[in-house]
Image (spheres, rainbow, N blue to C red):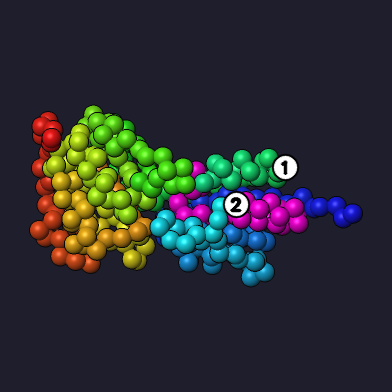
Amino acid sequence: MATLRSGSVSLVGAGPGDPELLTVKAIKAIRGASVLLVDDLVGPGVLRYARKSARIVHVGKRGGCASTPQAFIHRLMVAEAQRGETVVRLKGGDPFVFGRGGEEAEHLRAAGITVDVVNGISSGLAAATSLGVPWTHREHAHGVLLVTGHAGESNAELHWPTLAAAAAQGLTLVVYMGVQRLASIQAGLLTGLPAETPAALVQHASTARERRLITHIGSLSEDARAAGIGSPAILIVGNVLLACPAGAAERTEVDTASLVSAQLPRPSSRRTS
């Protein structure tokens, strides 16, 4: 019986798309890989760091689209590592921010596979940066909540009124994978936030295809439809958007003059019914 060689797997964050945002550690891991398992949201320029002899396998994971089953990816990672390969599981953003990195690491460790995690810049952070605002700000936001707008396989539903209450207390709300459910998210947020609360959507953050929309939650879904904003996009809600510099929405592909104000009004303490 042949003895299985000992390989390894690295869960590597490829960042939001711009290859210049890769970490040095991520580049080293990509260059050292004999097999790369690549998500759909990984920017094409990232793969230029792979060596010519590396085998590249695209294992698409995209909300709302046909995706490679997660169980198959688990089996593939284990099988390649057991063959002695140096495997890089290349993910958009950060593996531990809605990237299923936690469950993949657990599966690999349970199989006796050595696993390393290389962090990447999350698309939510890149989206805020593209708007010229931080997640936190001493005058506008003393914390940040990262949530998914996609219920997922468990069908677990977030309690949006609770999240709205947190945002009302000065937390920035950053929603991943929420475009397909934007109308219901908007309705939930309006149970605890004024309609004039600032909101922004950034699609394809950090890439040449990036598009931005700055609006208010009261007209969020309507404005997103008018602007043609689709997946993948990040939704940001909160007073930190009051710090958006003039021209923050200039990279949209539609005229947002009627949707955007360089000086967004401060939300009042009044709640909508």
- Position of residue 110 in the picture relative to residue 40 (left or right): right
Query: Where is 156 relative to 85, above or below?
Result: above
Q: CA distance from mark 1 to mark 2?
A: 17 Å
Q: Helix, strand, or loop for circle 2?
A: helix
- At horizontal 59% and vertical 46% (from top left) the residue drawn is 104
Q: Is residue 83 magenta?
A: yes
- At horizontal 89% and vertical 54% (from top left) the residue drawn is 1
Q: Quadrant of the C terminus?
A: top left
Badge number at residue 112:
1
Amino acid under disc 1: Gly
Please name which of the two marks, 1 or 2, marks the residue nearer to the observer: 2
Report the residue marked by disc 2. Answer: 71
As drawn, the residue found furthest toward the bottom would be 52
Amino acid under disc 2: Ala
Seen from the viewer's position, the closer of residues 144 and 30 is: 144
Badge number at residue 268:
none
- At horizontal 27% and vertical 50% (from top left) the residue drawn is 182
Q: Is residue 201 visible?
A: yes
Q: Is residue 98 magenta?
A: yes
Q: Earlier in the sequence, mark 1 or mark 2?
A: 2
| Magenta range | 72-99
Seen from the viewer's position, the closer of residues 51 and 69 is: 69
Q: Counting other residues with Cα less than 10 Å from the Cα at mark 1, is it few (<14), some (14-19), or many (20 or more)?
A: some
Query: Where is 203 relative to 107, above or below?
Result: below
Q: Position of residue 14 (x, y in %)?
A: 49, 55
